[in-house]
């Protein structure tokens, strides 16, 4: 988030440019002043008692020694019961070089190797060479074949001079070539840049230039936008076409195809581990809704630990069968290309998403796991009887973005899905928190389960700290489920920084934490719950209104399929909620119906005064483009 936005939340920015901005600053300051300070848990202090002088032998014999009182069981001690706050950053002074645990105990090839997810592929290929790695239409590819093709790709890139510090971009749907690029490109030391297939030519041209792309691998489905982008861009990369038999309408873009290119490579290419696990492995650009996007740089260490985190925090086990409904270009598919290599799973690729293609893939390939935004849930729930297939097993579904409402969770459970709610951003390798489930919550009713599952949860095991703090004081908010602050991250699952943007990097890491720009609360058990983006919060008459809260009420209306709420400028109140509503097929409702429903379930000042019925503008990953809605709301 830009520093200007952070300062608005903190109430410490410069002169406001509008009455609304001033109202927001004043409201946040007022709210912070009203909230009591967080109660600190008692800290057990260790007191070293003085040893009494020994008594005379005669006196000691006359009185038996008192037995020490029994200690309380560990689980009953206050120090164990309390929820710990994130520990301070471990920036202690390193031990002296001459210490006994440092002397003659140096790193060497026998006891140390940099962390990299590339070794996951090599291991699965050597341990499970004949197991399926990739399924795409009639195509079946084993782990041994996948490893060979990735080495060929790396070798072919190496032969044309691609190496450490170079950028290789790819623009493709969820096809095997996209998966292979996640290994073949970094095997050369180069950095993989997966392009969002929904971007226009001007934005792609900016990214190609900004990242100094040397090679562009592009699926022929995107020949028009790729050709236009190349005509705009200053760089002139080698262009390699993906000619997928599953797509017949493509037009060539480059002078060679992917298959011709990797045929020039050595299947026994001797790739090397990165010299340093801090070296970049991939580059992902943020959405750029307020200007040019920022390039988020991932390193080998973070990608490795994120992969372990996915496998540990979600019940994948060995050999899961994973359906690719999440775009691989989005945060490197939440690092699941590398996770699936770690657990020797099978990737079932899908070029196009629809209710029928999803149900067919789930049933035909006995899928066990899938990820996706709420829009994928809507595909499943809204499927017609002709599109549905009986599923042979329960399917684990990981979702992020907006929390699923109770009605959606119930519908998915009936379809034999179990939903795990995670939260993250591009800057933290995708998922970095998980709503870790407790077995005793299964006995709760559906609405209470949905309320608990809607929380963004607790940090991934590989993350050092996730908390909610006042960005002005950098103090953790009270764990009352009500006091809002900014969600902040620290640890191994945080990006290296923004490419060629030191100012934005410094602002993002201010005070030793990554500032997410998301506003949330912390519950008594330490679970966090988002309330809004700082730029999406509505300040009406000095009162904060969470758009997520309003959306959560409207989505429960029986006629509503989807909803998004944004601020509409208002002369009297500064801002007022405006709801954009999508109705279910065949359902009907008026603006008055929606407003009346809100009045029955919300405080009056939180109820939208304007309701617009229309489709919502969505990103390629299924998120609502609220910046577009804010423009529409001005004339609603």
Image (cartoon, helix red, strand yellow):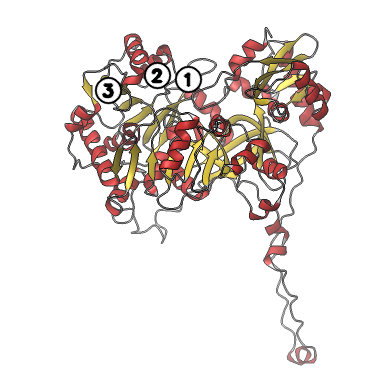
Question: Which element type, helix, strand or loop, lies under badge 2?
Answer: helix
- Report the front residue among 290 and 94: 290
Q: Residue at x 78, y 25 (%)?
A: 598
When asked about the image quadrant of residue 224, the answer is: top left
Image quadrant occupied by the N terminus: top right
Image quadrant occupied by the C terminus: top right
Residue 18 visible = yes
Q: Are marks 2 and 1 in contact (CB under 8 Å)?
A: yes
Disc number at residue 241?
3
The tag earlier along the polypeptide, 2 or 3, is 2
Question: Which element type, helix, strand or loop, lies under badge 1?
Answer: loop
Disc number at residue 224?
none
Question: Which element type, helix, strand or loop, lies under badge 3?
Answer: strand
Vertical side of 71 occupied by 481: above or below: above
- Report the front residue among 580 and 83: 580
Q: CA distance from mark 2 to mark 3?
A: 19 Å
Vertical side of 413 occupied by 596: above or below: above
View extreme (top): residue: 635
Residue 474 visible = no
Side of 326 relative to 604 (left or right): left
- Residue at which label 2 appears: 207
When asked about the image quadrant of residue 631, the answer is: top right
Within-10-Å neighbours for mark 1: few <14, some 14–19, many 20+: some
Side of 325 relative to 168 (left or right): right
Q: Are marks 1 and 3 in contact (CB under 8 Å)?
A: no
When asked about the image quadrant of residue 189, the answer is: top left
Vertical side of 630 occupied by 185: above or below: below
- Residue at which label 1 appears: 293
């Amino acid at each position: 988030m830009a520093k200007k936005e952070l300062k608005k939340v903190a109430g410490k920015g410069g002169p406001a440019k509008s009455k609304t901005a001033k109202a927001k600053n004043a409201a946040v300051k007022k709210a912070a002043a009203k909230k009591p300070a967080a109660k600190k848990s008692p800290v057990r202090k260790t007191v070293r008692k003085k040893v009494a002088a020994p008594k005379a032998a005669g006196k000691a014999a006359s009185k038996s020694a008192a037995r020490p009182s029994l200690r309380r069981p560990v689980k009953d001690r206050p120090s164990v019961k309390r929820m710990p706050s994130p520990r301070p950053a471990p920036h202690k002074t390193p031990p002296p070089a001459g210490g006994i645990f440092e002397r003659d105990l140096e790193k060497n090839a026998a006891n140390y190797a940099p962390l990299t997810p590339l070794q996951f592929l090599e291991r699965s290929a050597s341990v499970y060479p004949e197991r399926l790695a990739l399924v795409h239409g009639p195509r079946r590819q084993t782990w041994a074949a996948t490893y060979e093709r990735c080495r060929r790709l790396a070798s072919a890139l190496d032969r044309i001079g691609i190496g450490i510090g170079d950028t290789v971009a790819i623009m493709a749907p969820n096809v095997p070539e996209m998966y292979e690029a996640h290994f073949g490109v970094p095997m050369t030391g180069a950095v993989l840049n997966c392009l969002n297939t929904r971007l226009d030519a001007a934005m792609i041209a900016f990214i190609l230039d900004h990242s100094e792309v040397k090679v562009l691998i592009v699926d022929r489905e995107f020949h028009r936008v790729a050709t236009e982008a190349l005509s705009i861009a200053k760089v002139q990369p080698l262009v390699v076409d993906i000619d997928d038999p599953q797509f017949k309408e493509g037009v060539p873009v480059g002078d060679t195809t992917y298959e011709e290119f990797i045929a020039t490579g050595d299947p026994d290419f001797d790739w090397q581990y990165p010299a340093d696990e801090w070296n970049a492995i991939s580059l992902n650009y943020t959405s750029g809704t307020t200007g040019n996007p920022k390039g988020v740089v991932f390193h080998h260490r973070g990608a490795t630990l994120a992969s372990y985190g996915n496998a540990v925090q979600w019940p994948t086990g060995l050999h899961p069968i994973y359906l690719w409904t999440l775009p691989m270009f989005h945060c490197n598919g939440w690092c699941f290309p590398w996770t699936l290599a770690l657990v020797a799973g099978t990737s079932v690729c899908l070029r196009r998403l629809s209710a029928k293609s999803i149900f067919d893939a789930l049933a035909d390939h006995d899928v066990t796991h899938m990820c996706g935004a709420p829009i994928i849930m809507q595909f499943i729930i809204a499927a017609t009887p002709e599109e549905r297939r009986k599923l042979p097993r329960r399917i684990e579904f990981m979702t992020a973005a907006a929390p699923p409402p109770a009605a959606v969770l119930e519908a998915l459970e009936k379809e034999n899905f179990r939903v795990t709610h995670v939260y993250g951003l591009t800057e933290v390798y995708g998922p970095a928190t998980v709503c870790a489930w407790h077995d005793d919550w299964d006995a709760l009713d559906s609405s209470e389960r949905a309320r608990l599952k809607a929380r963004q949860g607790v940090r991934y095991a590989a993350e050092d700290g996730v908390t909610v703090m006042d960005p002005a004081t950098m103090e953790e908010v009270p764990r009352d489920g009500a006091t809002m602050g900014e969600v902040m991250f620290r640890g191994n699952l945080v990006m290296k920084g923004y490419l060629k943007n030191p100012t934005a990097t410094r602002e993002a890491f201010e005070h030793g934490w990554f500032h997410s720009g998301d506003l949330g609360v912390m519950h008594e058990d330490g679970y966090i719950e988002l309330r809004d983006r700082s730029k999406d919060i509505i300040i009406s008459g000095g009162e904060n209104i969470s758009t997520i809260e309003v959306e959560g009420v409207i989505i429960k209306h029986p006629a509503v399929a989807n909803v998004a709420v944004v601020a509409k400028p208002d002369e009297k109140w500064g801002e007022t909620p405006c709801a954009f509503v999508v109705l279910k097929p065949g359902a009907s409702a008026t603006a008055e119906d929606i407003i009346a429903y809100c009045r029955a379930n919300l405080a009056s000042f939180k109820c939208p005064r304007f309701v617009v019925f229309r489709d919502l503008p969505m990103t390629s990953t299924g998120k609502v483009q609220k910046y577009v809605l804010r423009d529409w709301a001005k004339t609603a």
